[in-house]
Image (spheres, grey):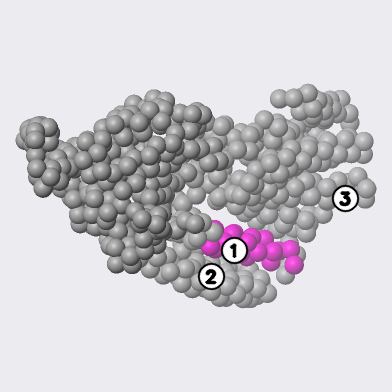
Amino acid sequence: MNLRSKLWLAAVGGSLGLLALGALFLPHSLALTAISDLVQSFLLASGAIAFIPLARRARGRMRLFWALICLGVSFWFVYQMLWTYYEVLLRRDVPDIFSGDVVLFLHIVPFMAALALRPHIPPDEYATRLGRLDFALLLMWWLYVYILIVIPWQYVVADPVAYGHNLNATYLAEQVAFLTALVAFWIGSKGEWKILYANLFAVGVCYAIGSSLANWALARNEYYTGSLYDIALALPMAWLTWIGLRTSPEEPQAATRAVSTVYGVWVARFSMIAVFSLPLFAAWAMLQPGVQPQVRSFRVTLTLLAAFAMGVMVFIRQQLLERELIHLLNHSRESFHSLKRLQAQIVQSEKLASIGQLVGGAAHELNNPITAMLGYSDLLMSTKLTPEQQPVAAKIGQYVRRSRSLVASLISFARQAPAPKIPIDLNTLARTAVKLTQPQWEPAKIEVRTEFDPNLPKVLGDSNQLLQVCLQLMGNCLHIMSETGSRVLSVSTDQPKGTPVLQIAIEARRSPDSGEILRDSQVDARVEARIDARVDARVDRGDSVALSACQGIIQEHRGRIVYDHREDGAIRLRVELPEADVRPRGPDSGVPVLWQSQPYA
């Protein structure tokens, strides 16, 4: 609590002390009346002002809660100012039948509306839609009861005794209802909200006791403004300032044990009970003995008007309830269908997991014969072969290596555990891939050109996985070149816009005589179709599994593969990866585009 708040509380405490000294040492006089009325007005104004910063700093439902609390204290202040006007300025007692008494009855209504918001728990859908209308029904019923019991003796047939008795009875019933709600909310809350409800309950009890004592003393002709009875009335007024200065306006976070719809159900029940009680009040108004005909006619007419108004509200409520039930039914259907889809996805995921385990085991078993075939193919290539046999032997070695790459991709696809990532030099990785694929491109008489950027920044990743991607992409390009007749494969690295890039390109075919680019539309269409089949992982081909693994690896490394081609048959595959010092993006930033096809100039 800051210095301003402490000085504020000191002023409130000094005012309360001044009231106590006046009640103890000053006789009944205009000065004592003025001190008592002005001090009580100051205390109520201080309490209302103390809640204004809370309403200004809060948002949404919390702002409405504090605004209603401030409004209730303001009504109380207005009523006290009316008393001060009569007793200090007009210098006469407040009349027994006082029109301003309705303000005293209404000042509790904003407090009850604030409690109806249930600010100590997160809002539920029922409370926000139907609970407000139920509370409006109860509010109308309270106003109806006040007008039915109190107003006839004020405007229809003036009777100060009956008016005072009925006013005190209805005001006491309102206080009891408010205090009961505070007790229920105090039990169902915790933390700061429990303290707030406890303080409001203490304020309500203290004021109820003080007003009851004042009415008792007034009936015995012992009460006057400024007497000791006013201390019990002023104490809860001063308490309001302390509550406003020490309370925080933040939205509660799970401030209750559990959120349920019991509150909304009971509010709806009470609202229906209030509607059904109207015929009983009408019967009581008609059968009550000793009541003037004017009062009876007024009460019966009031009951009919209230029944019509509340009937309209019940009709509106039923329409809203019907919409709510339809909404809940549709939501239940959607939830049921979503649950069925989720169950199907879970079953499918379990099947895929079983298939992954099976594929992983089978791939490991295939490695042994593939390794043997690769050794025999290399041994065959090292022997003396005729010119007709050499291309056939090279084809055998090429397809065995492709099979081994496919098996490695299957194993990587089945293994889902992420590998640790370290800074990697893409130049070294590319040189290794070129060296490992040399047995594939040398026998096919393919020229491999390399151009590496010496200032290329390192990337963060797993060297084995990235090498697998490079080998797979180069193997696909070499396989396409062997079928299309292309003879130049370029492997390069660069860093456009600071992003490390590894590029694998199939150069356009040129005439060996003139050097002009050969344009064969049929061959180009075939080339494009084959590379698209490798890029699109949805195509049911053997390479699709390998490229799916490549996609997963690049996605895990937060990079992407860009594929572009020209009509002359040239193809570019660009692997873009973030620098090692760039942190990977979080899951909320979205998944990057892994494959992108676009023409280039």
Q: Which mark is residue 140?
A: 1
Q: Which mark is residue 313?
A: 2
Question: Which amino acid type is shown beneath numbered disc 3?
Answer: Tyr
Above or below, 385 relative to 282: above
Q: Is residue 95 left or right of residue 289?
A: right
Dot 3: within a 10 Å radius of its alpha carbon, few (fewer than 14), some, or many (20 or more) residues?
Answer: some
* Magenta-highlighted residues: 133-155
Q: Is residue 513 left or right of residue 210?
A: left
Q: Quadrant of the N terminus?
A: top right
Q: Foreground residue, 125 or 187?
A: 125
Which residue position is annotated with label 3? Answer: 86
Q: Is residue 380 left or right of residue 226?
A: left
Quick check: marks 1 and 2 in contact, CB under 8 Å? yes
Q: Residue at x 74, y 58 (%)?
A: 160
Question: Does the magenta segment cover residue 149?
Answer: yes
Quick check: marks 3 and 1 in contact, CB under 8 Å? no
**Mark 1: secondary structure:** helix
The answer, for residue 300, to whether it is visible in the render is: no
* Secondary structure, magenta segment, majority class: helix
Q: Foreground residue, 130 or 267?
A: 130
The mark that comes first in sequence, 3 or 1, is: 3
Dot 1: within a 10 Å radius of its alpha carbon, few (fewer than 14), some, or many (20 or more) residues?
Answer: some
- The alpha-carbon separation of the residues under discs 3 and 1 comes to 31 Å
Dot 2: within a 10 Å radius of its alpha carbon, few (fewer than 14), some, or many (20 or more) residues?
Answer: some
Q: Position of residue 264 (x, y in %)?
A: 45, 54
The mark that comes first in sequence, 2 or 3, is: 3
